[in-house]
Amino acid sequence: MERDDFIREPVKHIRIDGKLTVDQLIQQFRNSGSFGAGRLSAACDIYERMLRDEKCTVFLALAGAVVPAGMRSLIADLIRERRIDVVVSTGANMVHDAIEAVGGHHYKGHWFVDDYVLYKYHIYRIYDVFVPEEDFTKLDYKLVEIYDEIATESNGKSLSSNEFTWELGRRLSDSDSILRAAYEAGVPIFLPAVRDSEFGFAYWLHASRKTSGKLLLVDAFKDLPEIVSICKRSPRNGMMVIGGGVPRNTVQSAALASKKGMDYAVIMTMDRPEIGGLSGSTLEETVSWGKVKSAANKIMVIGDAMIVFPIIVASVLERLGEDFKRAPYLKPKGIGGI
Amino acid sequence: MEEKAKTAQKFCGNCGSHNAYNYPNQVFCTLRFSKGKEPIVQTLWCCEEWNPSSQECYCIKEAEKKQNKR
Ligand code: SF4
């Protein structure tokens, strides 16, 4: 690199007037190109490229309690409009989707509260979101019925977590539900750590009931050939990562197993790399594993995904315009879109 | 003393097998559920399989309040 290469593009200062749209604000961020503003504008560019690339399959990795916090309809809409082709989520996010699908609610609360009083009122806290215990209990009750039904129908055959979520979506009627939207759009939803959620507790109830006949069998190992095959068959792959953890690693490991590596990657996290955990690991570190290509379009945005992701989506949808139609490269086939 | 005697009384609402259901009047009993019996019971009911809960909650107090209002 020559000296001039380092000082090629001056910072343009952000100008704000009262008429800025979301994408116009992002363009101002791009002009600055600095710090979080620069990263956020780069993330919008990369997501736009993913969507305009007709041969790219877009994965959404979902960790952290964004569904109870208010991102449910946004994600369901992205699935229906095919701005997302595959979802890999924590079990908990889909549990919270199902809670609302069967009539429960999440409530605006506060982080400054006596948690023992909440305990005594049977109210659970997710930072500043409150969930009444009865909404979990009612879901459990319903889930056990559904598990009994699936177990009878599958007759001893195990399901991948994607087949399991497809069966759940099939039985829910709420049009705002992520599970329902995915079932209708043929978008697979994988829950690699399905047991670590209320879905696991409901399984325990289902298995403990003496009257239960057949037991539901969900085998997370069965997810692997399904998700690796998606990466393999898709000419290019991109991932939008909210948080990190098991969902992020499931997506990027599928890219590694298919000997491809991700072509596009946007990660939204507040985690740090110094402690060696996956959620804070940098994209450069991920390149060393071959999970993301060295030449990939990639950026990590350090910020609260509840703020960052809706801004990215709003900006990119504005760029694409209302007439933009996107068909998935891999056409959904049978159960679970596989 | 009277308060103590009250909390010592056995109800579904202070049993270790209860979960909130139709708060505060009814609770969901996991024990009955596992036995294939109707799991939704009155908070102020009780059965022979009562077992202590690890931490106190407001179910009984709230159910009684509601009952007294009627
Ligand atoms: S029915 Fe019996 S076991 Fe169940 S909550 Fe009531 S007292 Fe406890």
Image: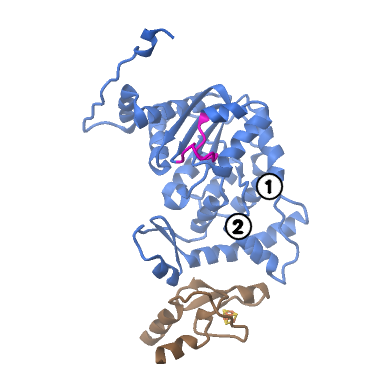
Q: Can marks 2 and 1 be said to lie on one chain?
A: yes
Question: Is the residue marked by circle 1 packed among few (<14), some (14-19), or many (20+) residues within 10 Å?
Answer: some
- Residue A163 in the image, given as x and y percentages of width and height: 67, 47
Residue B31 visible in image:
yes
Q: Chain of mark 1?
A: A
- Counting residues from the N terminus, which is met first, the one under dot 2 or under dot 1? 2
Q: Main secondary structure of the magenta part?
A: loop
Would you say the residues marked 2 and 1 are in contact, meaning their CB atoms lie under 8 Å apart? no
- Residue A227 in the image, given as x and y percentages of width and height: 66, 37
Q: In which quadrant of this rendering is ligand 1 seen?
A: bottom right
Q: Which colour denotes chain B? A: brown
Confirm or reject: label 1 Cβ below 8 Å from ligand 1: no
Residue B26 in the figure: left or right of residue A114: right
Q: Which amino acid does the dot numbered 2 rest on?
A: Phe
Residue visible at 52% across and 43% down in the picture:
A62
Residue highlighted by disc 1: A220
- Residue A193 in the image, given as x and y percentages of width and height: 62, 49
Confirm or reject: label 2 Cβ below 8 Å from ligand 1: no
Residue A262 visible in image:
no
Question: Is the residue marked by circle 2 packed among few (<14), some (14-19), or many (20+) residues within 10 Å?
Answer: many
Residue nearer the viewer, A194 or A103: A194
Residue B40 belongs to magenta span: no
- Residue A245 in the image, given as x and y percentages of width and height: 55, 43
Residue A274 belongs to magenta span: yes
**Magenta region:** A271-283
Residue highlighted by disc 2: A199
Residue nearer the viewer, A338 or A107: A107
Q: Chain of mark 2?
A: A
Picture quadrant of residue A30 = top left
Q: Quadrant of the N terminus of chain B?
A: bottom left
Residue nearer the viewer, A82 or A161: A161
